[in-house]
Image (tube, coloured by chain):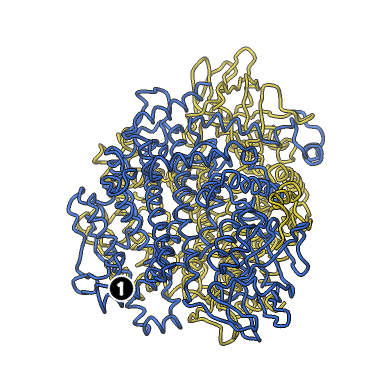
Chain colours: A blue, B yellow
């Protein structure tokens, strides 16, 4: 078993080259040692419980997987209570569970929605039993025929004055609630979005707490048709019982409508909310959580790929980092090929940038909510737009990057045991849920159009992240502006990188603004022609997201280099040096990937484009010795990675072999189906003598 | 059930707008009515057999799926014999089966390899029983530790002079054959790649016919450890028993080595093949088949997406094609959003271009083989390079496009019932098998570097597809050359489109050539620095593939407009008109997607870039009325599509609903796991009174 130990030796040897203290880097990523230790503690709680073992996941069909998901849900709830864990801990547990389970939306949506939209009395009534899992809830918005368009929903809640009740009804089957996680099997209650109808008048979608299954025997109540919608793409969400429900004149008490903002009195008088967008907070939260998760996911995927590609050897195709002199007779380590490095290392940089972005975005959310409770809605528009733009961009690169890491690993990447297949399957729906990644980009575009109007009226009032619009107001000057790079090293200056991002954002925003105005202005364009600008919305929204990602990553490194408030946020000089390389690579690779946007208006000259490509190659090559250390710093234990190819000890071939031996088909010497199908075929034309 | 019929009405109404004869277009795609009818006949043979029914696929785990795959394999073999079908028909059957099955490589590799590399006597011995399925074979090259690098293989075949045998051996477990389709359960024989050793001398990899399982009882022979490698990513290849095998001093007769080209005599004298690359033919075939398949796959994916997006309605967000006046109260059809059209329609154009490319590439292969049998190897280098470049590019857009179609369908696209999940899962490994899509691009790059040398020595000798290199030899003139577009319509001129593709290919090829020469020339760069150019290899190879795809699609339309030889290849004027729009969109969208390559050297001016983007939008919009007709023309029956969302009648919601009712979890009113897990949790803190 010489090759076995060669795998381990290769990974161990790669670690000796790391130029920085891996623990120090981990502290930077998680915001201090205490956070690192706490995350390990939470993950460790699950790792030791048999119900969370992942060894047989590859063989579970949907029926078996849901049963497992139910078992995991119950144990997760018990652990949360047993160890008195909070909501943040719950998020870490969900990460460690490593696949969506039926309980996910109970803590992730049911409780938060009641907390934010219920009255104090309603919170008092529903939250304590929900926190103790005496009831289990889900969140029911999407319908078979309708998605994120609330006003298109068909389910109705009609006020029945006589009995002081709501009659919930789905007349057509396209009104069936659909895709609802937790609804298929485990929930007892649902928060249901339904059109509120009083005396024939439609007041639009509102939320109602609806009992679904009896607390006695878990049977669905009469008037509710409920079930599981079936398996999902790629085996994703396999343990989740995404469900459907149809209501047939199903009655609930009037007070089951969540009435913090909108209210309906005993005599059927409707009171509308003080501000139309007060309920946006929970959408911002869900998106902010997603941005944070993408850092987790992409860091896992790059960890697996980096480790495996370090031990995988293929071809004797010499590279500048060939170790053939050290290891005569061995093939070249795949990670030494520049093509592989140029695909992989920018994703490691992206994962680091996503960690930074997740932290900033979560802080923006917290500040927003602090303001909202004081009645201050100033930040709402910007945070809403920013979270939309970042959700769209980050989930795109998160899912795409995970699949790219899988493909980077070549043939074995296609094995379920790579550990990246179930990850991608679970991530990729994030591109279409919580606002489709294309549709969502309209939010940032609309916001920027308003900022342009503000900029023209009063430049001082433009928010910091939109200040790039100001130079573009001087059209002639802006049209002549070009990048100031003259030599290779210029591309390493953060101010030059940011200037390029800002110029691109400003140009795209102004072009959109011009096009909209040519169509009759923003307000009319929300009418007839707005959808004709959606391609441009997508471009400017992703451009803006890339700009703030680059900016926030730089700022996070500055903070690590010169911690102002919290010493825990500081990092050692060796870590800062590598982080700056990552930041440069992240910024320049993002520009290179979207080069047309920077070059098509001649902001970049042909020579500057060449220098950019050359600088990206140099930066990539300079990370070769640190790649393994950089992914080790993400601190993902083997339990979490669940990968034969990316385990910490590098023993990939041994693990692939051992995993194959557990394949149930291998329990029999001759396959099932031989006697019935194969033997008759082989013998159809008589016995063969060879 | 009003919405139900609205779905059907919407799709039926869309069909009334089609500007061309759909049957005529289908004839163009398949090369005449006879081919269309024959394809329908073959698919129909399978559609009526219960074993090929796909209704329960979403719930099969790997164990059950392999058993199904075995049953399907046996029936497929019987049908092939019963109806006396040929190899082309077998390919159509595999397409109709719709998921890789264990028998795939018997007809797809085992038989072709023996036919091409066996002597007449060997063909006589093995092929008749193989054709009658008295033996079932597979093709064993890849090993646990080694992939496409033949010289890295560890399995050995050592000549045993005393007994006139080969001793097949895998000393280390990394030498285990791995990923071998058909090996895990059904095969009786394998064609094995192993290093040929005589008297301690290694002659490199050669192929041997190796008996694996007894024809008596199907038990593996002593000395062979064989089994299934376990499940694959995304549930792909689930019905295939990709297997492993280790040989322990396993003996086979000397004549089991395939000896058409290399030979070993009774006394152990080795004779090498007359030409080192004579065995490349089968690689070219496998790649050419893949290019053809990508047309099938992407056409299926666009069919499903186009139909579903026609019936799906979301938001009352008016578009220029809003039908709110016809259908007051209904939301907007999703396919009417320009953003959706701009993502979807270029993929329909790509699918058409892939049909054309598949035909041309297959003809190139046939001509090559005709030449080879006459000892003419002139075309080998070009066809090998071309098939490599196209395999890399086409499988990239085939798999990526299928996933993009799935995402275009939003939430419901993530349902297994979309029909695109199992498709992507089956396609995506094509990006890494038969030559990794990145590694493979070196072939085209090497070929072009040689063509540059030829161009310098004797411009007349450059092959037609490399003629674009000639203008680039005049460096000063070439550096100043720019695109001649001055107005929007100029972009519709094929010669302008081709000139842009040619300029880009020539520039990238010359830059690569310069870089290689700066590193000491091609021959030395194959040594130390070649891998440093692999990023550039990838760029030029994909650029070349895009160029010939655009060119071949144009030529195929010319042929349809003015059929020279075969009247069956002709198409009606209305069809030709739409095809030209598709060709324009395909070419211009490809340029737009890769715009940096065309703009970064200032070949395109800022204004030309703007005109390009504007023209793409116009072309996309002009296809709106024809989209459904264009995908109907692919002629994929519901049996093949296996999609609740993309069925021919448009009744998507009804089918999704009906499919969900078949979910096994829904057979019980209360979920399994309630008593064991959920009830104890709910009651942990006592009975709740709400």
Between B690 and A24, the one lying in front of the other is B690
Q: For this view, does A667 lie left or right of residue A646?
A: right
Percent from the top left, x then y, of residue B685? 68, 51
- The residue that appears at 53% across and 74% down in the rendered structure is A261
The answer to which quarter of the image holds residue A136 is: bottom right
Q: Secondary structure at mark 1?
A: helix
Q: For this view, does A558 lie left or right of residue B42?
A: left
| Residue wearing tag 1 | A510
Between A68 and A687, the one lying in front of the other is A68
Q: For this view, does B297 lie left or right of residue A629?
A: right
**Residue B38 seen in the current view:** no
Percent from the top left, x then y, of residue A445? 39, 71
- The residue that appears at 64% across and 21% down in the rendered structure is B250
Between A448 and B448, the one lying in front of the other is A448
Count of marks, rendered view: 1
Percent from the top left, x then y, of residue A472? 24, 71
The answer to which quarter of the image holds residue B480 is: bottom left
Q: Classify B266 as above or below B113.
A: above
Q: Classify A376 as above or below A609.
A: below
- The residue lying furthest to the top in this view is B162
The answer to which quarter of the image holds residue A675 is: top right
**Residue B203 seen in the current view:** yes
Circle 1 chain:
A
**Quarter of the figure that contains the C terminus of chain A:** top right
Label 1 Cα crowd, 10 Å radius (few <14 / some 14-19 / many 20+): many
Percent from the top left, x then y, of residue B408? 53, 64
Q: Classify A205 as above or below B244.
A: below
Between A107 and B410, the one lying in front of the other is A107
- The residue that appears at 81% across and 40% down in the rendered structure is A676
């Amino acid at each position: 078993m010489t090759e076995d130990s060669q795998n381990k030796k290769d990974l161990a040897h790669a670690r000796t080259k790391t130029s920085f203290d891996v623990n120090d880097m981990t502290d930077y990523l998680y915001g201090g040692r205490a956070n690192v230790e706490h995350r390990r503690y939470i993950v460790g709680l699950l790792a030791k419980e048999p119900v969370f073992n992942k060894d047989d996941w590859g063989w579970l069909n949907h029926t078996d997987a849901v049963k497992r998901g139910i078992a995991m849900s119950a144990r997760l709830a018990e652990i949360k209570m047993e160890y008195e864990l909070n909501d943040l801990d719950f998020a870490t547990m969900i990460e460690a569970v490593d696949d969506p389970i039926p309980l996910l939306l109970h803590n992730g949506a049911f409780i938060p929605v009641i907390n934010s939209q219920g009255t104090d009395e309603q919170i008092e009534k529903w939250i304590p039993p929900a926190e103790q899992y005496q009831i289990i809830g889900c969140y029911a918005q999407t319908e078979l025929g309708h998605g994120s368009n609330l006003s298109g929903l068909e389910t109705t809640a009609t006020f029945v004055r006589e009995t002081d009740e709501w009659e919930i009804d789905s007349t057509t089957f396209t009104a069936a609630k659909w895709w609802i996680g937790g609804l298929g099997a485990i929930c007892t209650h649902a928060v249901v979005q339904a059109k509120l109808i009083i005396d024939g008048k439609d007041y639009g979608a509102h939320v109602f707490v609806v009992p679904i299954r009896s607390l006695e025997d878990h049977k669905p109540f009469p008037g509710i048709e409920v079930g599981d919608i079936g398996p999902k793409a790629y085996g994703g969400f396999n343990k989740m019982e995404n469900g459907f429900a149809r209501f047939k004149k199903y009655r609930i008490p009037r007070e089951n409508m969540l009435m913090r903002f909108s209210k309906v009195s005993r005599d059927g008088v409707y009171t509308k909310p003080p501000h139309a967008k007060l309920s946006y907070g929970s959408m911002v939260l869900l998106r902010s959580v997603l941005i944070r998760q993408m850092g987790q996911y992409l860091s896992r995927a790059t960890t697996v790929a980096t480790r495996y590609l370090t031990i995988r050897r293929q071809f004797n195709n010499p590279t500048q980092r060939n170790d053939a002199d050290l290891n005569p007779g061995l093939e070249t380590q795949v990670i030494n090929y520049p093509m592989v490095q140029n695909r992989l290392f920018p994703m490691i940089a992206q994962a680091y940038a996503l960690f930074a972005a997740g932290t900033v975005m979560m802080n923006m959310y917290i500040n927003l909510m602090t303001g909202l409770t004081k009645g201050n809605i100033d930040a709402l528009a910007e945070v809403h737009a920013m979270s939309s733009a970042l959700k769209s961009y980050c989930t795109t690169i998160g899912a795409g990057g995970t699949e790219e890491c899988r493909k980077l690993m070549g043939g074995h990447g296609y094995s379920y045991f790579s550990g990246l297949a179930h990850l991608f399957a679970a991530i990729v729906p994030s591109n279409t849920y919580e606002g489709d990644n294309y549709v969502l980009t309209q939010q940032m575009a609309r916001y920027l159009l308003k900022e342009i109007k503000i900029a023209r009226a009063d430049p001082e009032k433009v928010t910091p992240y939109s200040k790039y619009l100001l130079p573009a107001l001087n059209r002639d000057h802006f049209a002549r502006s070009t990048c100031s790079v003259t030599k290779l090293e210029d591309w390493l200056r953060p101010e030059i990188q940011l200037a390029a991002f800002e110029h691109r954002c400003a140009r795209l925003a102004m072009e959109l603004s011009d096009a909209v105005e040519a169509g009759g202005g923003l307000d009319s364009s929300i009418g007839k022609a707005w959808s004709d600008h959606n391609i441009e919305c997508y471009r400017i929204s992703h451009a803006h997201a890339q700009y703030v990602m680059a900016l926030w990553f730089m700022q996070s490194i500055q903070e690590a280099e010169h911690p102002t408030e919290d010493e825990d946020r500081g990092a050692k000089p060796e870590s800062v040096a590598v982080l700056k390389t990552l930041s440069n690579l992240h910024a320049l690779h993002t520009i290179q990937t979207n080069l047309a946007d920077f070059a098509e208006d001649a902001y970049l000259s042909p020579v500057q484009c060449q220098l950019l490509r050359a600088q990206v190659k140099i930066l990539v090559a300079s990370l070769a010795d640190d790649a393994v250390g950089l992914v080790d710093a993400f601190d993902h234990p083997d339990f979490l990675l669940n990968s034969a190819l990316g385990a910490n000890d590098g023993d990939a071939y041994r693990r692939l072999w051992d995993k194959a031996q557990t394949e149930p088909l291998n329990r029999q010497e001759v396959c099932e189906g031989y006697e019935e199908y194969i033997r008759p075929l082989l013998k159809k034309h008589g016995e063969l003598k060879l």
